[in-house]
Each structure stands twice: as structure tokens, then as C-alpha cells.
Amino acid sequence: MGIFLKLGWYFRREWKLYLAGVLGLVFTAIIGIIPPRVIGNVVDGINQHRLTARSLAIYLGILVAAAVGQYLSRYLWRNAIWGGAAGLERTLRERLFWHFMKMDATFYQKYRTGDLMAHATNDLTAIERVAGGGILQFADSIITGGTTLIAMMALIDWRLTLIAVVPFPLLAVASRYLGKKIHVAFRASQAAFSRLNNKAQESISGIKVIKALGQEKADVADFNDQIDETIKINRRVNFLDSLFDPAITLIIAVSYAATIILGGLYVTHGIITIGNLVSFVTYLGMMVWPMFAVGMLFNTMERGNASYDRVMELLNQTSAIVDAKKGLTTRPHGDIDYQIKQFNYPNDAGTSLVDVHFQLHAGQTLGIVGRVGSGKSTIMRLLLREFDQYQGQIRYGGHDIKQYALDQYLPAIGYVPQDSFLFSNTIRENIRFADPHVSQATVEAVAAKSDLAGQIASMTDGYDTQVGEQGISLSGGQRQRLAIARALLIDPELLILDDALSAVDAETEAEILANVKAERADKTTIIAAHRLSSVMNADEIIVLDAGRVVERGTHADLMAQHGWYQAMFERQQLETKVKGAVH
Ligand SMILES: Nc1ncnc2c1ncn2[C@@H]1O[C@H](COP(=O)(O)OP(=O)(O)OP(=O)(O)O)[C@@H](O)[C@H]1O
């Protein structure tokens, strides 16, 4: 019953719909009493030789009217109850999807994609069933079952009815006992489905790596193990499910036996007529469905309850990134003042950034270089408000970045990581993702700036070329340039290129960076790169090591310091010369 209480907010909101549904069920049940009674009367009429053509016609008329009445009332409850269930599904899907949109990076580190997909599909379906089938089973078992029982008592014989229903409480005992077990088993089954989903999602996404490393067999074996585990858990659910139906059949059989023995005695002693007994047996037959409904109801409720708990667990996760109430609605512009004393990733004891300070005036370019894992991307991730729990402050345009409303702050930043996500759509739609209404001319202009226009022109479908899932049909360099074009389209106040040109050659990179600089005279740019020539024209370059700034200055300053930067720069120059000589 708990799940009905948990979904109370929805039933209260849609009370009109559910009232219409319950009324429809009540009418259906009441009208359902008529045909067995009429049939009993006809049997008695035949038995007692008093059935006339006129009375038969009247009985037939009543049966037809009852059928039409049931048609209409069934239409009413079906529309109302299934409509209500669809509404709940929509509401929960929307809530969950919005929740996914609002969650921070930590959430996505904790939950895997396949798991989230399982919540958004199987679990929501199980909850929707409560608001549809569950309500139907609940109302039907009470209304149809109750009305039929009353009819049996009032119209036929209350003693016979009592004897017939003696075995019924056994059903409640069985439901209670099995219900709890089903709850636990179903939760385990949904969790197993999540794991299987994760496995499938990861294997399909990583298919290139699996093939390249010849791991197909191992991966299939791993997948098969997961399937076996899921089947084993589902078998338990099915086993518990299958205990319900035979229990109901057994209870009904005992009722029939008692009815026939006692009813037969009553007829022979003239307490009830044979027509009454026919009506009674028909009514008892009408109790079969409500009895199954009770069985199914426990099942639906326990499944819905387990799924509701799983979905709520997700919805109760809060994002550590709090969107400032009445946050600044101005677009950030001006100087960036980055003062981080210390930052470590959640659930990670190691310190990722220590004493990272820099100031950047509007229109300036900052270069960030350093070894792999030295903290370059982490600096950007704090600027992008992926993580807020650091010691220190980041100010943009004179305000703490946490004071801005997120929907004002983030659109002012064009962030291009090394591996940008592309949508499985055309090149044009990917470029104008942030503003689907911009003209073709604007799309072409940003494609030209990111040195992509020529290559798009040589494609058969030009800007209509489908990039495939995650841009699979494009080269790494094309994907990176497309991502830069997409960022340039919004003319961001701050452009962040996080190793975003690693897959293009040095010459093309220089050309794109020159375009960016010419275009963005009063706008700020941060470039993180491994190729030092990418940042040599920056106004300031910081060199990171293990999350600390170990060298800083302009290219000339850093060359004069004879540190890591100078050594690395000379090594890279030498490598370029050797490569040039080989070619
Ligand atoms: N989500 C995370 N949770 C925990 N630790 C993380 C997380 N992301 C990065 N780190 C750690 O923080 C450190 C800095 O990572 P970061 O990605 O900023 O380095 P980077 O300099 O950009 O590296 P690269 O040059 O390879 O891109 C690394 O030690 C990394 O393992």
C-alpha cells in the first residue's frame, strides 16, 4: 500500500481523472450484477414453465442495455485511468531529465550511463504501472469484488456466500508473505538490469578499442556472465510471481466445491431455486478476476515501490553546484581574477591544485602548460563551475563567479576540450547547436575561422553531411575544428581551448589561433596545450607541476628562466625540425 501513499501527490493533483475512473469502475461493477440475475430468472422461468415470449424479450432488452452501459462505463474508466498513468510517466520523465541536466560532475562520476538509462526506462515503467494497472487492480478488486459479494448475499443467500468466501483470507496471507519477498527480489532484478545496461552501453561505445585490442571474446564472455547473473535473479522474481496464480486457482476451486455441496443441499431442500444457484455460480465466476487482481496488485505495488525508491534515490541527490538565488543576470565581462589556494576532487584525498593565482584582463590570452596530469584541465573545470568546493575565489568582471546565475554565466564561455561531444546530426546543426536559428552565412564564417570550410566544401553533402554518432565519420582534427567553430559561433567572452588543437598540424593550429586572435580583440582566451608553440604568443604563460605553478611569464621570460619550459620548447623545436627533414 506504501506506493499509493508515496504517489499520493500525483493522485491528489489528478483527482478528477481518478474520480472519473473509479466512478466508471463502480458503474461497470453495478451493471455487471444484472446479467447473472437475468440469466437466473430465465432459468427459473424455463424450469417453472412460465417464460413467455414477452418476458424473454424484456430480459433480452435488459441484457442489451446492460452491455451498452458496460461499454460506456468501461470506456470512461479506461480513458481516465490509463490517461492518468501516462500523465504520471510524463511528469516523472520530465523531472528525472531535468534532474540529470542540473546535476554536477560528481553525480556523473558516481552513476554510470547505463544505470541512469535503466532508471529512466524500466523503473519509470514499473511506477507508471502502479498509476494504471495498479489503480485498476486496487479499485477493481474492491469495487467489482465487493459489489459481486453484496449481490451474492442480498440477491441469493448470505449463508451460502459466507461459506463460499471462507477460503478468501488465505489470499491475503499469501500476498503478504510473497509481497515482501517480491519487493526484495525485484529491487535486485532492477539493479542487475542496470549493470547489464552499463555493460552493453560501455561495450558498444568502446567497440573500437575492444576490437583493436582483440578483446571481443573476452568481452562477450563478460557480457554472458552478466546475462547469466541477471537471468538468475529474474528467475527468482518469476518463481515468486508464479506462486501467486496457482494459490488463487486453489482458493477458487475450494470455493466452488463448497458452493456446489451447500448450494445443492439448499436447492434440494427448496431454500433457493435452481435459477438462484446458476446466478450464484456465475457470480462466483465473476469473483475470479478480482481475486487475480488482488494477486497482481501486490505484485504491481511491490515492483512499483522498489522502482520508486530507486528513482527517488537519484532525485534526492543534490548537486554541489548551487545556482545563486537571484543571481547576477548580467553577462560576465572584464577581468578574470583566479585565486585558488587549494582544490581536491571530491572523494579524492590527493590535492589537485595548490596556490594557483593569475589575473587576466579582457582581451588577453593565458597559456597553461605542464606535464600530463599536472592540473591544466582542472583549472578550467573550476572556471566552468563543474566543481565549487575549493578554497579561494574566482572573480570575473568584479564578481565572484558563484554570484552569477548559471544560465547567464555559462553561455558566456566557449569551452572546447580535447575530445568534444558531437551530436549525431549534420555538420551545420552541430556548428549552430547553441543557436539553431543563425544563418548559413554565419555558420560558414565560423567554419572558415576554424579552417574547416575548405574540407566541408569538398564533402559530397557539404554542411548537410551527417557526422554519425559522436562524430564518428569525421577525423580527429575535423572533430576538433568543428568543436571550435561551434564555440566561436556564440562569440564567447571567454574562449577556453583545452588541448583543443592537439589533432591538427602545427601550421593549421597557428592559422586558427591567428584567426581567433584577430577576431577576438577585446575578448579573453585561455589555451592549455602540450605543444608549446600554441601558447608562445600568449600574454602570460603558466607552467604547472603537480597542481602548482612552477614557472610563469611571457615566452621570452620563460626562455630566459632556463627551466622546464625552455627545455621542453627546445626539444619540441628539434623534433619538428627532425620530422621536417624526414619528410
Ligand atoms: N574527476 C576526477 N576525480 C579525481 N581526480 C581527478 C579527476 N579529474 C582529474 N583528476 C586528477 O587531477 C589531476 C589533474 O588532472 P587534469 O585533468 O587537470 O590534468 P591535465 O594537466 O589537464 O592533464 P592532461 O595534460 O593529461 O590533460 C590528475 O592527477 C588527475 O588524475
Image (cartoon, grey):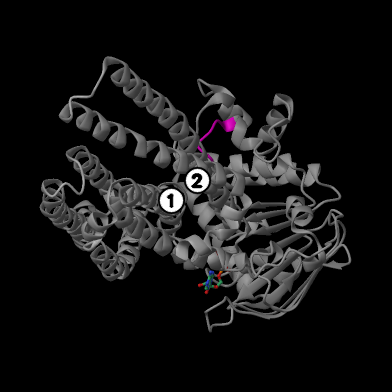
Q: Position of residue 121 (x, y in %)?
A: 43, 50
Between 124 and 335, the one lying in front of the other is 124
Mark 2 in CB contact with mark 1 (< 8 angstroms): yes
Give the magenta part as a residue range: 423-427
Q: Which residue is mark 2?
A: 22
Image position, residue 472 (x, y; %): 44, 39
Residue 139: give its label: 1
Q: Is residue 559 visible?
A: no
Structural distance between the alpha carbons of marks 2 and 1: 7 Å
Q: Position of residue 169 (x, y in %)?
A: 27, 65
Residue 212 is left or right of residue 306, and the answer is: left
Q: Is residue 230 magenta?
A: no
Find residue 406 and report its image quarter. Answer: bottom right
Q: Residues within 10 Å of mark 2 (few under 14, many from 20)?
A: many
Magenta-highlighted stretch: main secondary structure?
loop
The residue shown at (57%, 28%) is 456
Secondary structure of the residue carrying tag 2 is helix
Q: Quadrant of residue 100?
A: bottom right
Decide if residue 263 is on the left or right side of residue 349. left
Q: Amino acid at mark 2?
A: Val
- Which of pointers 2 and 1 lies earlier in the amino acid sequence? 2
